[in-house]
Image (spheres, rainbow, N blue to C red):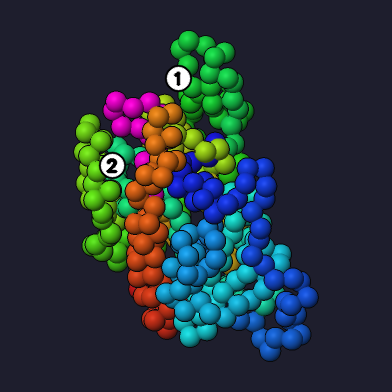
Amino acid sequence: MRIVLLSLLSCLALSACQPGTDAPTQTTPAEAVKTPAESAEKLQVKAVVVAMFEIGEDEGDRPGEFQFWKERYGLTEKYPFPHGFHDLYYNPEKGVLGMVTGMGIARASSAFTALGLDPRFDLTKAYWLIAGIAGIDPQDGSIGSAVWTDYLVDGDLAHQIDAREIPEDWSTGYFPLFANEPYPEQEGEVVARNGEVFQLNTTLVDWAFNLTKDIELMDTDAMLALRSKYTEMPAAQLPPKVLRGDHLSASTFWHGKLFNDWANDWTAFWTNGKGNFMTSGMEDTGSYQALTYLDNAGLADKKRVMVLRTASNFTMQPTGMTAAENLASESSGAGYAGMLPSLEAAYTVGSTVIDEIVLNWDKYQDTLPGQQ
């Protein structure tokens, strides 16, 4: 089940990736990697900025998630990373490392693990900002908005029966592992034993949201025109803003009202009614799972992880259109009105938080924001 990163797949198509082929990685051969013996000491990283994809080059062309960070944040020092998808780039003055994981849970989780085990870097006190585009539920927000995440919910770990074969009283054929029906009655709270849900550090999320909630985000006439179609959803018609909500992470690219209903129900089930599905994407449960293992090994601190997803598109169609029609419209040349604004929002909001941390490192090195 993948989440509506409609914009992402469109961008990859426009950058000449052909169906059935694997996009090339942007890494340097292994022989160029410095060994621990060649490095005087481990690089003390203050923050890692994580993007999931780039469209073409890292600079100077149509941007993906990484380009604004590379161009604007002084990520000039290259660290070859042949054991990952894309070479790493570092700002030595600010102590910020930039990583591109590649699309999907498999690439993201392996990239985090590879970085965490890399002997060149000390990440024990690093803050992690996962900043990427997403679909947004039009019942909760509008395109171009930036959403700080509390819960990461996995949408892949499940049983599935084709909807044409399910009992008449079932709402979906997609239901939790080890259950016999959708959303079974539980004695007490639902317990996620297989990585179905993760809750981020609430205090850190509070701090990041409060620091950035008043930032004015990019808006355009094209965004206004798209928003105006969602006449029955007031939140979708609002200008973009900084929000707070929960993220559904999965590998299948989905779209439409019925899947959107499922995403809301699935998120509510796994968070015991505490979470609200707001954004959709591919990688984040895999990324965070890898970080929890690095935390177990004393190589990273999962309490320092933030996830910021910015809305490039809506996860369902407006009234008067079918899901297929809306998906086709988004995939056309006139689609993805929120693509560039969402990339701008990810950088504008994300860099505000990273700047606050690295420019006040004496304050945040040992004490997390919100705990002073």
Counting from the top left corner in percent of width and height, residue 95 is at 50, 80
Q: Is residue 251 visible?
A: yes
Q: Which mark is residue 84?
A: none
Q: Nearer the viewer, residue 28 or 302?
A: 28
Counting from the top left corner in percent of width and height, residue 127 is at 49, 69
Q: Amino acid at mark 1?
A: Ser
Q: Is residue 288 visible?
A: no
* Above-or-below relation of 107 to 273: below
Residue linked to disc 2:
226
Find the magenta span and give its range: 311-323
Residue at mark 2 to residue at mark 1: CA–CA distance: 30 Å
Give the label, 2 or 1, closer to the camera: 2
Total numbered badges shown on the rendered structure: 2
Dot 2 or dot 1, earlier in sequence: 1
Which type of secondary structure does the marked residue at label 2 adopt?
Answer: helix
Counting from the top left corner in percent of width and height, residue 238 is at 22, 46
Which type of secondary structure does the marked residue at label 1 adopt?
Answer: loop
Residue linked to disc 1:
171
Q: Nearer the viewer, residue 43 or 195?
A: 43
The question of residue 322 being in magenta is answered with yes
Counting from the top left corner in percent of width and height, residue 79 is at 63, 76
Magenta segment's dominant SS is: loop
Residue appearing at x 35%, y 70% in the figure: 352
